Structure formats: C-alpha cells, structure tokens
Image: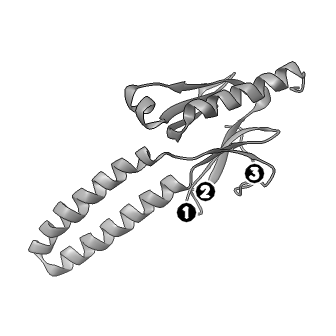
C-alpha cells in the first residue's frame, strides 16, 4: 500500500469517520460467552483457573474494543488514508494516493441500510493488494460520495500528476 511514513494523524486532514456501533456487536457477543460461560466453567475447575480465565477475558475484550476505536478514515491533499492500531507494532497508516485512486464503492444490504453501517472499498488503479477495505464504516455511503466527489474535483482541475 502507499503508506505515509508517520504513524500519527496529521492536522491538515478532512476526517471521514471510524467504525460504527455495529462493529462492536461481535466483541460484545464474544465477551458475553467468555464472561458468562467460559469463566464460570473454569472457576468450577479451580479458583486459580477461574481467575486466569477472567483476567485473560478482560484483557482480550478490552483490547478488541480499543482496536475498533482506533480506526480512523481521512483524506488530505495527498490521498485517502486509514489509521489504526493500539499496540506500537500494530499502529500504522495505509492508503491510496489521489493519482492512484480507481474508485470508492460501498456495499449495501438490508442491515447496512437500516443501521447506516456500510462496508467500503477504496480501490487502487493498479493493484488490488493496495486498496482499502473497511467493514462497519459509519455513514459509509456518504464517505464514498465525499471521496469520489473530491477525486473528480482533482481530475477536473488537472491536479493529479
């Protein structure tokens, strides 16, 4: 992917949003199973096993929530970027430069229409491995229109080299 070398989000950006509340449903379901089923079973086996499973469940669930909250989609004068990551070795920015952008699309379903939470794809003209795929994007339909509109403005202004 075309990557920016800095891991921090620059200040001269237009924010497009992050993950929707629907992304958290999976984490809540897994947390429910861990806390209400697995932990009591481990506790019955032994108190030490119960404490270990409880602590691991808390750590896993907290990490998953923080990971989802870290997603941030934005654009600047160079291209469209997604920032994500909690741990230092997982933090990063990936994106597509305006000159290499093919198109941005969103995928509709009844659930995405009802909850305004769309999966989006920001395509790269030359390679599929450098595209941005994000599921559960808040107002993804509006994000796609914003990206495509900005790209068309740049094409019309002949600003892409």
Q: Quadrant of the C terminus?
A: top right
Callout 1: few (<14), some (14-19), or many (20+) C-alpha neighbours within 10 Å? few
Disc on res. 87: 1
- Image marks 2 and 3: residues in contact by CB distance under 8 Å: no
Q: Earlier in the sequence, mark 2 or mark 3?
A: 3
Please, what secondary structure does the residue beneath circle 1 have?
A: loop
Q: Nearest the camera: 47 or 37?
A: 37
Q: Looking at the image, is 1 positioned above or below residue 43?
A: above
Residue at 74% across, 55% down: 6
- Residue 138: image x %, image y %? 53, 41
Residue projecting furthest to the left: 44
- Residue 31: image x %, image y %? 30, 59
Residue at 16% across, 80% down: 47
85 on left or right of 94:
left
- Image marks 2 and 1: residues in contact by CB distance under 8 Å: yes
The residue tagged 3 is: 5
Residue at 82% across, 39% down: 77
The answer to which quarter of the image holds residue 75 is: top right
Disc on res. 91: 2
């Amino acid at each position: 992917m075309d990557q920016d070398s800095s891991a921090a989000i620059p200040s001269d950006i237009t924010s497009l949003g992050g993950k929707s509340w629907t992304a958290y449903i999976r984490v809540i379901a897994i947390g429910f199973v861990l806390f209400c089923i697995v932990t009591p079973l481990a506790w019955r086996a032994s108190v030490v096993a119960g404490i270990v499973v409880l602590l691991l469940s808390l750590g896993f669930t907290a990490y998953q929530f923080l990971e989802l909250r870290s997603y941030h989609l934005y654009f600047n004068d160079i291209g469209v970027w997604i920032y994500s990551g909690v741990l230092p070795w997982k933090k990063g920015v990936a994106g597509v430069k305006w000159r290499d952008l093919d198109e941005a699309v969103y995928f509709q379903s009844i659930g995405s229409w009802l909850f305004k939470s769309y999966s989006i794809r920001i395509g790269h003209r030359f390679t599929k491995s450098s595209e941005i795929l994000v599921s559960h994007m808040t107002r993804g339909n509006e994000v796609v229109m914003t990206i495509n509109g900005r790209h068309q403005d740049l094409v019309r202004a002949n600003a892409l080299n």
